[in-house]
Amino acid sequence: MQAQRKAPIGISKEASRRWQENYERVTQGSGRLFLMAGDQKVEHLNDDFVGSTVAAADADPEHLFRIASEAPIGCFATQLGLVAQYGGDYPEIPYLLKLNSKTHLLPGAEHDPRSRQWQSMTQVQEFMQHVDVPIVGVGYTIYPGSEFEAEMQTEAAQLIHDAHQLGLLAVIWAYPRGRAVGKREHDPHLIAGAAGLVACLGADFVKVNPPLNAQGEAEAKLLGEAVAAAGRTQLVCAGGSEVSSADFVRRLDAQLRDGHSAGCATGRNVHQRSQQEAVALCRAIHSLVVEDRGLEHALALLQED
Amino acid sequence: MQAQRKAPIGISKEASRRWQENYERVTQGSGRLFLMAGDQKVEHLNDDFVGSTVAAADADPEHLFRIASEAPIGCFATQLGLVAQYGGDYPEIPYLLKLNSKTHLLPGAEHDPRSRQWQSMTQVQEFMQHVDVPIVGVGYTIYPGSEFEAEMQTEAAQLIHDAHQLGLLAVIWAYPRGRAVGKREHDPHLIAGAAGLVACLGADFVKVNPPLNAQGEAEAKLLGEAVAAAGRTQLVCAGGSEVSSADFVRRLDAQLRDGHSAGCATGRNVHQRSQQEAVALCRAIHSLVVEDRGLEHALALLQED
Amino acid sequence: MQAQRKAPIGISKEASRRWQENYERVTQGSGRLFLMAGDQKVEHLNDDFVGSTVAAADADPEHLFRIASEAPIGCFATQLGLVAQYGGDYPEIPYLLKLNSKTHLLPGAEHDPRSRQWQSMTQVQEFMQHVDVPIVGVGYTIYPGSEFEAEMQTEAAQLIHDAHQLGLLAVIWAYPRGRAVGKREHDPHLIAGAAGLVACLGADFVKVNPPLNAQGEAEAKLLGEAVAAAGRTQLVCAGGSEVSSADFVRRLDAQLRDGHSAGCATGRNVHQRSQQEAVALCRAIHSLVVEDRGLEHALALLQED
Amino acid sequence: MQAQRKAPIGISKEASRRWQENYERVTQGSGRLFLMAGDQKVEHLNDDFVGSTVAAADADPEHLFRIASEAPIGCFATQLGLVAQYGGDYPEIPYLLKLNSKTHLLPGAEHDPRSRQWQSMTQVQEFMQHVDVPIVGVGYTIYPGSEFEAEMQTEAAQLIHDAHQLGLLAVIWAYPRGRAVGKREHDPHLIAGAAGLVACLGADFVKVNPPLNAQGEAEAKLLGEAVAAAGRTQLVCAGGSEVSSADFVRRLDAQLRDGHSAGCATGRNVHQRSQQEAVALCRAIHSLVVEDRGLEHALALLQED
Amino acid sequence: MQAQRKAPIGISKEASRRWQENYERVTQGSGRLFLMAGDQKVEHLNDDFVGSTVAAADADPEHLFRIASEAPIGCFATQLGLVAQYGGDYPEIPYLLKLNSKTHLLPGAEHDPRSRQWQSMTQVQEFMQHVDVPIVGVGYTIYPGSEFEAEMQTEAAQLIHDAHQLGLLAVIWAYPRGRAVGKREHDPHLIAGAAGLVACLGADFVKVNPPLNAQGEAEAKLLGEAVAAAGRTQLVCAGGSEVSSADFVRRLDAQLRDGHSAGCATGRNVHQRSQQEAVALCRAIHSLVVEDRGLEHALALLQED
């Protein structure tokens, strides 16, 4: 388990108190984060939500909220617009507002990724003034190596600052990408670079894709360089495409144990399952990440399902 | 019939009350929307307003207002500039201000679509403070897949937020378009993706073009994926190019019945007709969408004309 | 003669009163406008102001002010910077501030036209607070079909709104132009489209170039489609390159009579003449446009000269 | 000698009084301006400040201030950053803050010139509130014909307006340039066009390069068209590359006498000389421009040196 | 030793007092600066922080703070985000906030460098209001010759102004770079040009790369032109890639003695060493730069290590 975090400096006492409260809430006292990622309806449009291997319930955005309200997650990251529509009926979920999103329609071979902040932090603040649901933080994706990296890094730096002023957590999705990056996007050293960059931005958590070795295979211990480079910015690993629940749990256990990650951020592996299966998987994840009860216990939880 | 909507959260009680009032007004208690679209004088310049198959009266913009004031529409969507000029004489029409528009002069093969917000929401608010006519909402078009999608999605997200703060409805026209989209713009799965994206933006309604099957034919049930993906954002279908009144009504009936759409948004099919014919068609649409009295009744209303 | 205009809605009572006052002033109660255009020192640099067919006095910008102060014009449109320098000596001229201008140096075959607002409306307001000369309105040029049309249409929409809030008139110069438009810029149907677009922007007047028929000749009745499309936005025709005074007056008479235009906007045909000839031509124009005394009377006024 | 100038209208009485004071100060009652230009450390980097024909003292930026404080100049134009560092030691110099500058590193054959305002006028005002040195005006360069002309013309228009609101003079450096201009940048007619454009911007002075005739030679009387086109905006001629002091003085005399320019703006010809020579040349310039004592007297002053 | 600096003019008395205090603090009364540069986690991602020649401790960002807190540095330049996370535990370090950073992922042959300010000066001020750690100044990198130089020079000018208003020092990293510069980036004359440009921006210090002679070798006396061109803006030399401690100290001594630089800015040469070695090198640097005790003493300090 990681040591307790202190709030960043440069904010008011009240903001510091709120940040601490939000940090405790999402890590449930464990210092580790289980983030349920639900921003794919923009990033992947409807590709993740229908298909032969996808639960029928996933066609409806409310599926995300149903899972998030029943499962023991740290926070649920999704767009403000969805929270505005469903949040009133699911007021117990800790929400992390994902503030930028782009579609995957523009081909990477011709267009470097460019994602722009949707709502301003002033609008986020306005939103928060009128809701009773817990808004614990904000999220934003950067693409180091894109020819538009400068504008995204500036937006990220500014929203992290503003989030902290309000006592909110800031989580950065960091994916090296663009024509200059090409196939190196899974390179452990490059991912470590991105993680270090996010530390300089001052985020509380950085979400990275799992690094691959020279053979193109995921190896948990490859995370080590990135975890070190991120310093006090805690690193969580993206879940990636769908695998079996047991495989997912094993991979996560390795990331926590061998990679020293500080949790996980998973989307498709959760929401593409039925409500029951999704909640069971979330319980197993929670058991590993937050309760630290080991792989066997987590696998056993899956069996119960 | 769909269940009643609740106002989005994150707004003041007063804004919530106004939103509810506006929602009731445009759906006339039915939970479904008949939007008369009148933004084509920019989008298509004068192409839709003159020609051998177009009523002579349509050459004058006031034709739109004459129809909208006599016909039982949910709201009339047009540019603020026209409302500023004609609204004083047609104070009973519920107006939806369409805040962006572009011409069709730039060829799509060379230029991805780019449409920018005309008036700021501060200007809209200033406008509303001084009018007695009902302004029920705002509209905006996005083009997912355009290389400019990021700037349009940000403008859309911000104006939806600001509209809700004022208690206004927000309707998004969502058309996948651009060189990366090409001929796929009528693909049901892509349209569903766009509808889901709009849900994430937090709009109250999304207007899409009717999806086509592999043979290039419209099939109402193809709307199902999009309606599901849109979740609580209600989906209305664009009317498309001119057909006979009876065919229009049959197509709409199928969209409502088989496609589970929440209404329709039609422009040319209404305004290219004479005042009398246009109003008759609107009555038939209203009978289907709002009164839910079935196809036969709607067709009979056309005969009366 | 056209019916009297009402002020746009969405503005304060005081602004409405001022707008009415300005409208009366520039149309001199006739409902028609004679706008003297004097923005060519940027648009055409010095090309219009020297040459064998140009009066020597025209080399000096003050020539414009001398004419405008002596001739019975509706308003004189020029840049704020010139008004700041000469307006104090010509305080009786009704000024319309032309807020954007570009040079003709960039070749159209490589660069679509892009013209940006010079002074902000806040600056215009600041300017007005300190002057005793009548500022009756603002002007702006848009180029539908340019790849930069979006930014110009947004600037136009916003300044029209702001002008109306201050009780100022708004006049839009609308010229379809750019590589996508090419040689179609004189097409009557396209000009009608531009006029309709300006109606949607909410301008009080639109200035268009005279449409040409398939043989490339001006025909006044071709204006009809544009006048209809513009609706309550009144249409005035640009004067074009220099012709004899008598020919100019005949062409204008046809535009008013057969084309149903609401006046004229002329620059070169006025300022390239000597003070005496320019004033005589302006009197003839005024007699046609404002006094509606017919062609013979106008031609007779030229003879007096 | 030119008639006295009146302050522009559209500004407060206090601003008008200050403008008059600044105008008197820089023209020393003569209605003509001797501007010492010192912005080349950015425009030409270090090229003008070292070399076999350059005084050794010129390597140090303070050289500019030493000359400006001893010589009878109208004002010294340089960047705010230099004034912030040296101004406290040279509090008697009337400073004109040059607000934009670019390097000459980007080749003109590939990049049209683009120069952006450095400090905002709000920052200039903040600066002025805390200094005891006389800030008499601001300067800005525009490049008509550059594909970026729109953004520079807007910045220029806005800063001229804001300068006048503060009672500051506004001087525009106007150089037609860019691939569309090519070799025509010395064309008298084009320079006249640029001068007329600056009049429309409302500047008090325009600085142009000396026009050349068809043989590529400078001819003072070619300035006539530009002086006329500039109207009440007074025209001063740039000094150009280094010549002998006597030749410089003869050329200037011709510009004043035959070209009717309203002074000169010179940089390299002054600062590339030793302090003593530079001051002597400035005295000769002052004698011609401000005292109007004729060429012989000016040449004699050089001999004294 | 250089003479004491005076604060720039144009700022309040309180700001002037604070500037003086910060200047004294970072130069420790010597008038020279030893800046420890720690912005490479973005500029070079993780490349500088792992590898066979890099101390293992350097993998963790806290290494930078451990060195900076123990070594006698003038100030430690790093991103605000890192200071927000670590500053609370290292409250004795004088921090200089580096406000822009970019990655090295985009190849220079295709992309001119573009680096954008991360936090606004308003955010910096907000940050400072809530911290007890000494923030002594801000830093920013410009790339003269990049096609984006205009936007960077404007950001630099504005933040220098704003920093001075707050009594903060402003340090500019100035690297001529881009396709138009190519291999000339080490040219002494071009570096002098960049240094002069920074003087015009009004920065207190300029950091340049060591110029190379025609043979590609560093020669300390080549700095002379740049030191002169920078005038009152004091010049410090970047440390460059890693060399032995003794070689580093010898090179620095030459830069100070023969090149008349005002200190050094070094990163990799410090942080790639173990805590003990890094501190020892810093002591040697401090002895040279601040204490001015000569090369022998500095080398001796290294031996102690």
Image (cartoon, coloured by chain):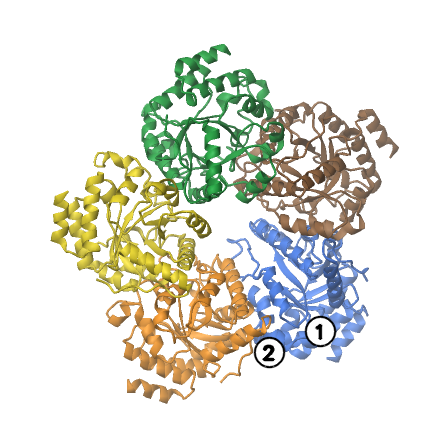
Chain colours: A brown, B blue, C orange, D yellow, E green
B36 vs E8, left or right, is right
Marks 2 and 1, the one that precedes in the sequence? 2
> Which residue type carries mark 2?
Ala
Q: Nearer the viewer, residue B171 or D174?
A: D174
> What crowding class fits label 1: few (fewer than 14 Cα within 10 Å), some (14-19), or many (20 or more)?
many
The mark found on residue B281 in the picture is 1
Please tell me in which quadrant of the rendered image residue D12 appears: bottom left
Tell me residue D240's x, y (percent).
Answer: 24, 47
Q: Are marks 2 and 1 on the same chain?
A: yes
* Residue nearest the viewer, comparing E303 with B227: E303
Q: Position of residue E57 (x, y in %)?
A: 59, 20
Q: Amino acid at mark 1?
A: Leu
Where residue C199 appears, as percent x and y from the top left, is 54, 71
Residue B57 badge = 2
Identify which residue is drawn at 67% across, 74% down: B68
Q: Residue at x 43, y 86 (%)?
A: C292
Q: Chain of mark 2?
A: B
Question: Residue A73: horizontal and vertical position, in percent?
Answer: 78, 37
In the rendered view, does B107 fall on the left or right side of D66? Answer: right
SS of the residue at dot 2? helix
Mark 2 crowdedness (10 Å alpha carbons): few <14, some 14-19, many ≥20: some
Q: Which mark is residue B88?
A: none
Q: Chain of mark 1?
A: B
Q: Is residue D81 above or below residue C173?
A: above
Would you say the residues marked 2 and 1 are in contact, meaning their CB atoms lie under 8 Å apart?
Answer: no
Q: Is residue A178 above or below residue B134?
A: above
State whether residue E244 appears in this view.
no
Q: Helix, strand, or loop for circle 1?
A: helix
User: Is residue E68 visible to the viewer in this orientation of the structure?
Assistant: yes
B271 vs D99, nearest the viewer = D99
Q: Quadrant location of the C terminus of chain C? A: bottom left
